[in-house]
Image (cartoon, helix red, strand yellow):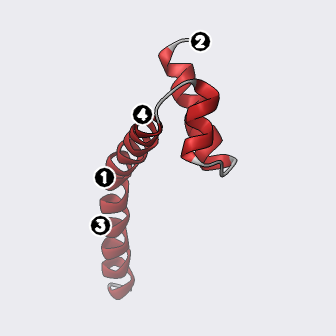
Amino acid sequence: MDAINLNLNVINEVKNKGRLLSDVAKDYGLSTKKVYQIVHESEQKSTRGSLPIMQQTKLLAVRIKQLLRQR
C-alpha cells in the first residue's frame, strides 16, 4: 500500500468510522502520534482550502445586500 492510500485509509478509519487513534495505529503498524499527524494534517489542508470560499461567500452576501437596497 502506498503512502497516499495508507493516509486515506487512516483518515477514513478515524473520521468516518469513529475509531480510536490507538486502534487504527495498531491495525496499520503505526504509532498513535503518526496517526494523529495524518489526521491533523488532513484537517489543516481542508481548513486552508475552504478559507477563500468562506471569504467569497461573505463578499457575495454583502454584494447581495447592496443590490437589494438599490431596488
The answer to whether residue 70 is above or below residue 47 is below
Q: Nearer the viewer, mark 1 or mark 4?
A: 4
How many angstroms separate mark 1 from mark 4 (CA)?
29 Å
Q: Earlier in the sequence, mark 3 or mark 4?
A: 4
The answer to whether residue 8 is above or below residue 13 is above
The answer to whether residue 61 is above or below residue 23 is below
Location of the C terminus (image quadrant):
bottom left
Q: Nearer the viewer, mark 3 or mark 2?
A: 2
Find disc 2 in the rendering and name its residue.
Answer: 1
Mark 3 and mark 1 in contact? Answer it, CB < 8 Å: no
Of residue 62 and residue 28, the one placed in the foreground of this image is 28
How many angstroms separate mark 2 from mark 1 (CA)?
33 Å
Q: Position of residue 47 (x, y in %)?
A: 37, 51
Label 3 Cα crowd, 10 Å radius (few <14 / some 14-19 / many 20+)? few
Find disc 3 in the rendering and name its residue.
Answer: 59
Q: Secondary structure at mark 1?
A: helix
Q: Secondary structure at mark 3?
A: helix
Residue that appears at 59% across and 12% down: 1
Q: Earlier in the sequence, mark 1 or mark 4?
A: 4
Q: Identify the residue at the far right of this view.
A: 17
Find disc 1 in the rendering and name its residue.
Answer: 52
The answer to whether residue 29 is above or below residue 36 is above
Amino acid type at mark 3: Leu
Of residue 54 and residue 19, the one placed in the foreground of this image is 19
Q: Position of residue 9 (x, y in %)?
A: 61, 30
Give me the disc on residue 34: 4
